[in-house]
Image (cartoon, rainbow, N blue to C red):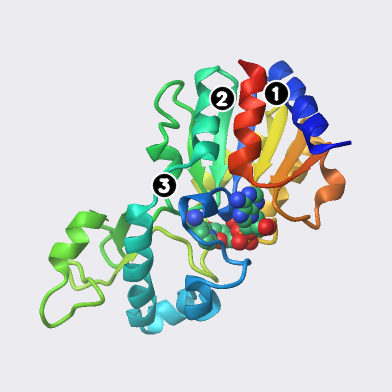
Amino acid sequence: MTLQEDIMKTAEIIGKSNRIVVFTGAGISTESGIPDFRSSGGLWSKYDPDVYANYFLFLKNPSPFWTMHHEVVEMLLIAKPNSAHYSIFELEKMGKLKAIITQNVDMLHQRAGSGTVNDVPIYELHGAFGELYCLKCNKKYNHDEIKDLLTEKEKIVPYCECGGVIKPTTILFGEQLPSKILSGAINACNNCDCFLMIGSSLLVTPANQMPYSAKNKGAKVIFINKEDTFMNNIADFFLKGKVGEILPKIINYLK
Ligand code: NAD
């Protein structure tokens, strides 16, 4: 089948579905200027995530993480949602979407409008860059408040008024996923009629168990990604290409 035929078939499935779960990975945001982990070049070649985003190393010395985080945040703040994020919001406006599950920390789904029309939950499995908390007293902070906490003496790592170190909710390697968010996401997968995976290598667990949960409950499974994934065999349709080009075409068929 050609990509065009796959797009039409996918639009047909989406047209018949009304409990869709969208599952996104870093690939949805590359067209917004945020590099993913696996493609070569960019920020992640400079900051090896295994070192700079390791939870146990953070607990020992948070400086390397925070050095990287300040640079990543500059990039995330200027990034804007792209046509793929807006297409997902279109599905919400059509009343077809049950939940968004994202591995991304960039908060671009919210900035595209998702969650505002039909109260579709956005399960951020790996946290969000703009939500932070003190590891000692649990006080919550937002991104702007952090800037005020960085003093002349300590320009890199922000500390809470209680003396505890502050960390974003972004999940580091070796850290547990928040159980409430994880169970909400699994529940959504168990109750969907269509599982739409967008821009993920599906290499990260436990997130990559979710397509199986949906498939086992009888949902149609559709993957859209620039390159093959090792789980393509469970997808009813695999659409290979750029999500920012493919998703708007699918939405156009639905209008
Ligand atoms: P990944 O880097 O492992 O895989 C991304 C996939 O998207 C790759 O297979 C790539 O071929 C594909 N891709 C890239 N651009 C695409 C495009 N325009 N259209 C279609 N496909 C495209 O990312 P992952 O599976 O999300 O897992 C890695 C981890 O990276 C996640 O835990 C996530 O938290 C983190 N991460 C997040 C961001 C972000 O928030 N935007 C950015 C980098 C990494």
**Residue 116, visible in the rendered structure:** yes
Marks 1 and 2, how far apart at CA: 9 Å
Q: Which mark is residue 91?
A: 2
Q: On the picture, is 17 further left or further right than 63? A: right
Mark before the other along the chain sequence, 3 or 2: 2
Q: CA distance from mark 3 to mark 1?
A: 25 Å
Dot 3 or dot 1: first in sequence order is: 1
Residues at marks 1 and 2 touching, judged by CB atoms closer than 8 Å: yes
Instruction: State whether label 1 is within 8 Å of ligand 1.
Output: no
- Dot 2 falls on a residue whose secondary structure is helix
Q: Quick one: which residue is furthest to the left in this view?
A: 152
Amino acid type of disc 3?
A: Met
Mark 1: give few (<14), some (14-19) or many (20+) Cα within 10 Å: many
Mark 3 lies on residue: 107
Where residue 37 appears, as percent x and y from the top left, is 58, 66
Residue under the point 89% across and 36% down: 1
In this rendering, would 90 be left or right of 222?
left
State the quadrant of the C terminus. top right
Residue closer to the observer: 119 or 24: 24
Spatial CA span between label 3 and label 2: 18 Å
Kindly check if marks 3 and 1 are in contact, taking CB atoms under 8 A apart as contact.
Answer: no
